[in-house]
Amino acid sequence: MLLGEAFTRSASSWLDEPLAPAAYPVAIGIVAARNRIPLADTLAAFLHALASNLVSAAIRLVPLGQSDGLSVIARLEPTILDTAERAADASLDDLGSACFAVDMASLRHQNLEPRLFRS
């Protein structure tokens, strides 16, 4: 929710009316819809931002330089675009996951203090 609220504040310049606080992916979807950005483009931008954020964290946490980080992102672009295209055509029956251990770790992580790279 914190990331969604931060995104909402940042995106307010592109909105005609205020946006209520929402989870990050929901806020992105609302802003994109209000600005008539096609779904496939929105998904590709979201996935690119996710990959970029993860690579940025890796650059700071492991011995990975900026040039190597950019190379990783460049190599991910075909996968990002393919995934966005498939997701744009997916139905609700196609979406979902079953990552219980990751979900439980994520629930614990949100309450840690201090959190690394907290939004």
Image (tube, rainbow, N blue to C red):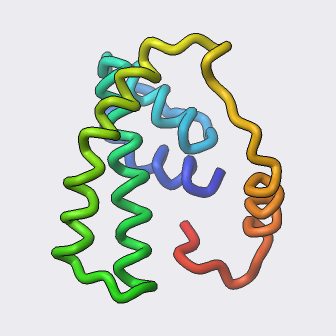
Q: Which of 37 and 75 is in front in this view?
A: 75
Foreground of the two, 10 or 71: 71
Position of residue 103 measured from the top left corner of the image (x, y, whole percent): 77, 52
Q: How many numbered circles does the render carry?
A: 0
Whether residue 15 can be seen here: no
Which residue occupies the foreground of this view, 37 or 89?
Answer: 89
Relative placement, left or right, of 12 versus 95 is: left
Residue 91 sits in quarter? top right
> Residue placed at 40% from the left, 41% from the top?
46
* Residue 7, horizontal then vertical, whole percent: 46, 49
- Residue 22 x %, y %: 62, 39
Placement of the C terminus among the 4 image quadrants: bottom right
Q: Position of residue 8 (x, y in %)?
A: 48, 44
Name the side, left or right, on which 106 lies relative to 13: right
Q: Residue at x 48, y 28 (%)?
A: 29
Residue 47 makes an appearance in the image: yes
**Residue sitting farthest toward the bottom:** 63
Residue occupying the far left of the picture: 67
Image point 68% across, 29% down: which residue? 96
Q: In which quarter of the image is residue 69?
A: bottom left
Q: At x 62% / y 57%, what residue is drawn?
A: 2
> In the rendered view, does 117 fall on the left or right side of 65?
right
